[in-house]
Image (cartoon, rainbow, N blue to C red):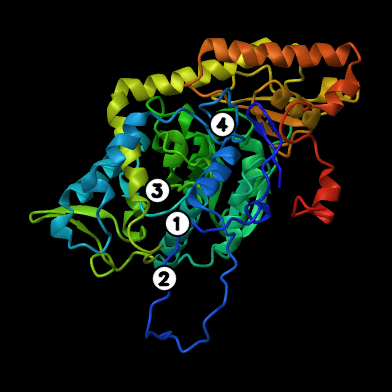
Amino acid sequence: MTNKSYALNYEEPLLWEHRVSDGCGVDLPVPKNTALKTGQTARETIGWPKLKEPQIVKHFVRHSTKNFSIDHGFFPLGSCTMKHNPRLNEKVARLSGFANIHPLQPESSVQGALELMFDLQNWLGELTGLSGVCLSPAAGAHGELAGLMTIRRAHELNGQGHRKIILCPDSAHGTNPATAAMCGYELRVIPTKETGCVTLENFKEALGDGKDVAGMMVTNPNTCGLFETEIAECAKLLHAAGGYFYCDGANFNALVGKVRPADFGVDVMHINLHKTFSTPHGGGGPGSGPICVADSLKDYLPVPCVIKTNAGFKLETIEDRPSSFGRLKGFQGQFGMFVRALTYMMSHGKDGLKQVSEDAVLSANYILSKLKGEYHAPFGDKTCMHECLLTDKLQKEQGVTTLDIAKTLIENGIHPMTVYFPLVVQGAMLIEPTETESKEAIDGFIDVMKQIAKDTADGKTEELHANPQTTPRRRLDEVKAARQPILSAKV
């Protein structure tokens, strides 16, 4: 097959569509006088493309040039905190004493790794004000599951197993109600549409007498980019009714070093190490979602936690803490993420982590102040946290939608923000610049957004509908693509 190339904009076929080579990347002679140990008939062909190693390397490198990353350009992806990952983190994670160990090694041979985990537990406990920490959950949603299972275990062992209701705002991450359902709970929704926040009045109505309420799941700052100002009072009422407060830690980037979640009543919280503390999670990379709990719930955490004894550091077992709900996953969690996160924390220190939050919040409010004239800001009268919320309400009057705006950002070399979320706001654009973007980069984004608004007002709608026009792939007919996918370039 002949490849057409335009500078670095390659038309690269699928691996199986390349012309068959006269050789393979691996060429081993067939062993003599051997038989398959499985007793099966030998396959005549495996079916892999017959290409040499240089051809395969070029194929994947060409595809990699189509990737957009935080190292390419501006990446204002709200709710995911796509921030710069310091290379120091990677260097430390690759040290042989960390990279070349095995989870089944004797504890005596990995004392340094266990000490690192112990120190990370202490850092997370200090930052959240929640002293019980388990590192094993593998991602944010896994942390949610661990948190609710901890709450359920506590209620069951304390004779409160009849509590089957979880309170949750209508603006919550979709994983919150899904996790509650997986744990056998029923969901009771707290409406937030008018203010973007949980109000004391709406919370009281949802709580009722509280006798059947196991807890509530609230993200603070929430998915509208706002701090829940009445949440401490809600937590007091919840505790008085016998429930626990689970806080989704997806937006902890706005609070680190500034506010301890325990101080506004949180009992359980998961931390996205792969967001807040910079460890990479894009492209399906490993996540890490440790949970932190108040003293009242420490006995019910999953095992293992790392504890310090006179003989050194060790991993707890269910025999050490039989009140635990048990083991959540194989082994001890995503150790490489632990190394990167602790490196990030120790590099910044207490004052540096505080500045990270301050800079993230400043960046988001700067964008909000510059764009709320050109775009509808549903909660623009409030100070936002590390992400600001705009909608397409003004542009939609001219036939331009959030999707058109996002595609035009792509045309201008900018990765779009999160679109159409949270669902409580029509045509939402959730913009999170993070602390790692320079003012120049943020101003460039603002200029493009203002130009889109101007082009819309000037009636250039057809051009906006056609974007992106210079990317390797143009805009798809998404409905047709979903119903009639073309999985091969040979059509």
Rendered location of residue 346, percent (x, y): 27, 30
On residue 29, the disc is: 2
- Residue under label 4, please give it: 228
In contact (CB < 8 Å): disc 2 and disc 1 = no
Lower sequence index among marks 2 and 4: 2
- Crowding at label 4, few (<14), some or many (≥20) Cα neighbours within 10 Å? some
Q: Amino acid at mark 2?
A: Pro
Residue furthest left as drawn: 310
Question: Mark 2 or mark 4: which is in front?
Answer: 2
Question: On the image, which quarter does residue 255 sit in?
Answer: top left
Q: Nearer the viewer, mark 2 or mark 1?
A: 2
User: On the picture, is 249 further left or further right than 483?
Assistant: left
Q: Is residue 301 above or below residue 237?
A: below
Total numbered labels placed on residues in the image:
4
Numbered disc in front, either 1 or 4: 1
Give me the C-alpha separation between circle 2 and circle 1: 51 Å
- The structure residue drawn at horizontal position 61% and vertical position 10%, both measured from the top left corner, is 443
Separation of residues labelled 4 and 3 (CA atoms) = 23 Å
x, y (%) of residue 389?
A: 67, 26
Q: Residue 372, can we see it? A: no
The amino acid on which the numbered mark 1 sits, given as a three-letter code, is Ala
Q: Earlier in the sequence, mark 3 or mark 1?
A: 1
The residue indicated by pointer 1 is 146
Residue positioned 85% across, 48% down in the render: 479
Residue density around tag 2, few if under 14, some if 14–19, many if 20 or more, within 10 Å: few
Mark 3 surroundings within 10 Å by alpha-carbon count, few (fewer than 14), some (14 through 19), many (20 or more) = many
Q: Secondary structure at mark 4?
A: loop
Circle 3 residue: 290
Q: Earlier in the sequence, mark 2 or mark 1?
A: 2
